[in-house]
Amino acid sequence: MAPSQRRSTRPVRSNRTMIETYEESMSEDDPNDLSEFDYDQASRRSSLSLRPRNPSGMQRSYREESTDDNLEEYPDDSDSDLAPSGPADPPSHSTQPVPESEATTTTPSRPSRPQSTSRARASTRRKQAKRPRKQTRGQLGKPLRKRAKVDTEIITIIGSGVIPPWQTLPYQILFDIFMRASYPLVDEMTMTRNSSIQWLLDVALLCRGFSEPALAALYYCPPLLPTHRSHGLLNLLSKPQETLSTNYSSKIRELNVDVETILLYKSGPTLGYFNLDKLIEKTPLARRMRLYHKEDYIVGLPQWSIPQSKWSYSDSLFSTMVNTQIVLRSWDWNTRFLETDALLKFIREKHALPSFQGLRELRLLHFSDKDREDVSENEDILVESLKLLPDLQRIEFLKCSLVDSTLLLKLPSNLRSFTLDNCIHVYSVDLISFLTSHGGNLRELILCHNRHLNMSYMTILAQSCSNLERLKMDISMHDLSSFRDLEPHFPHLLCEKEVATWPPKLQDIELIQLRRWDDTLAETFFTSLVNAAPSLPDLRRLVISAILKIQWRERAHFREKWISKLEGVFLRRSKPPNPNLRSLRKRPLEPSEPAMQGDLTVSPALAVSENGQGAPLTPSKRQSSRLAQRKFSEAEDSVESEGEQSKMGIIQGMCDIVTIRIDNQRPMDTQFNEDDFLDTERSGDEDWNE
């Protein structure tokens, strides 16, 4: 017999429903309103130490959701007739039934929520449960919402609305524009292609008038990196050019080949080794050819640490040039590809070929003098080789210990450009002798990183190099060996009685890391430059970086004095251009007679609205007075500066660039400034316009 069922006096909960609070989003006993992911989260909630996350990557929140968060995606339905959350249960203030004994007792009850609010929340929960959830699972740590994008100010350029017919410009002008805008196409230090290559291709497809000059600029010195591009270029040149829309072979004038990357190794099993001889056969109009090593850009390597390349100069390379009838204008000889002694004899043989008879520029890299007993013999061979080049005008010695006083005096006398870079056996006495005998035709003199070379040669520079147009000297030293010797090997940059002279045709002066002098010698040097200002009418660029190891107060006074004086003498102070000479439509910027309002002169640029419709605006008195005061102060400073220089009778005023730096910093391989330590965050003062 079944046991009798006793009726419990304990009140029974209706559907065991939890009380709705702000910490519960939906009822526990309604599985139909829960998605599969919610069940999965509920089952794992007790075992995970981290807070559960939904598929979209948002953190689960136990606050009650509101329709205000999704106003953009879903319409506001707060005014609609919403159904209650529990269709089987009538709305009540409490989900637990109250016994009869307690129902008649008057006790203070909890204040109930408005019925419309509960209905709206129930409808919102039901809609959110029915929305399709994303299938992609978010990542841990993803923010709840995407951050709003910061509104950036869009600068609108007001044009005249007239586009000039650029495509009708002559071919040579367009070619020159594209060349200046795109080169270099390859960064040889990092062996990467620049974005200007794609820009030239886009320009070539823009219109028919741009196609020919843009492709000519692209193929003038075709980028051969990465290596599969060089094979693609060779395949293109191997096709009959008359069957193509463009004769690509006739546009190639320069070839820059990275030997280690392109010639030494295979380009995969299908492409194999790149054949440079075939490329030369397909480029008969090439005039500049440079075979370089990727480590040639590293400055400061000791001579004994420079490795020999596995690739070397071959006779087939030069015989191909002769058969193709190539006439070179520029060439490099590098001892990385053949030892010095063997290369010098090789040079003497190849300079006699017809391909080198029109050579104008020659670079010699890493020619060393390991055995000082054979120096004179190697110098004679090199001099004989140079004499075989009748049109040679430019010669560069880069890290060549073979160069000394004897070799300098034996060089050709018709040189127009001469460069000494990191040549340790050249002294000022040797350079003075060379400039005295060979400086009459020089237009460019570049002296960089030479340890024993000071500026004593400046005493005879104006007399010996009267046609010199560019002077560059860099006394910064680089040494990657264990010695780390970064100091020059001369006691003084200039002696006490030595006064620098300046050739009258100078256009560009660049003097970097001037040191080993005191304030007296530096003042004498700068005074000579200021006194020579009237005789330097062609000077357009002046860059000087000097190091003075004196007391900081004296150095600050010296810097303030001479920077302002050099800028006042050489910096161009032209009048601002006429603002009316602009292609702005509908309105001029400045009328002939400015309107007067009281005691203020209103600028027409301020009296026009920002939309460009010509609506007059009322200018601010404070703004107008501030602008007028600033213009007056600038004009007054300019007049005072020009007045002081006029009293001295020295004003050149034709330099577009005047950069003077005077400090006591220790010279390093890399100079850092303020911009190197700034982060990428916005300062918050972008809207301030003085």
Image (cartoon, grey):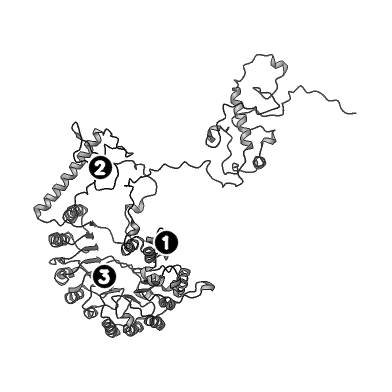
Q: Nearer the viewer, mark 3 or mark 2?
A: 2
Relative vertical location of residue 173 with respect to residue 266 in this rendering, above or below: above
Relative vertical location of residue 205 with respect to residue 602 in this rendering, above or below: below
Asked if the residue at tag 2 contacts the one at tag 1, i.e. Cβ–Cβ closer than 8 Å, the answer is no
Q: Nearer the viewer, residue 304 or 526?
A: 526
Question: Left or right of 321: which side holds 121?
Answer: right
How many other residues sit within 10 Å of disc 1, few (<14), some (14-19) or many (≥20)? Answer: some
Asked if the residue at tag 1 contacts the one at tag 3, i.e. Cβ–Cβ closer than 8 Å, the answer is no
Quarter-wise, where is residue 544 in the image? bottom left
Q: Nearer the viewer, mark 3 or mark 1?
A: 1
* First in sequence: mark 1 vs mark 2: 1
- Find residue 201 and name its label: 1
Question: Left or right of 404: which side holds 127?
Answer: right
Q: Quarter holding the N terminus? A: top right
* First in sequence: mark 3 vs mark 1: 1
Judging from the image, what secondary structure is the residue with disc 1 in?
helix
| Amino acid type at mark 3 | Arg
Question: Residue 440 location, x and y as percent?
Answer: 17, 74
Name which residue lies at 31% across and 84% down.
352
Question: Residue 561 location, x and y as percent?
Answer: 17, 53
The residue tagged 2 is: 589
| Amino acid type at mark 2 | Leu
Q: Nearer the viewer, residue 517 or 405?
A: 405
Question: Residue 272 location, x and y as percent?
Answer: 51, 75
Name which residue lies at 13% across and 56% down.
651
- Find residue 620 and name its label: none
- Find residue 451 and name its label: 3
| Amino acid type at mark 1 | Leu
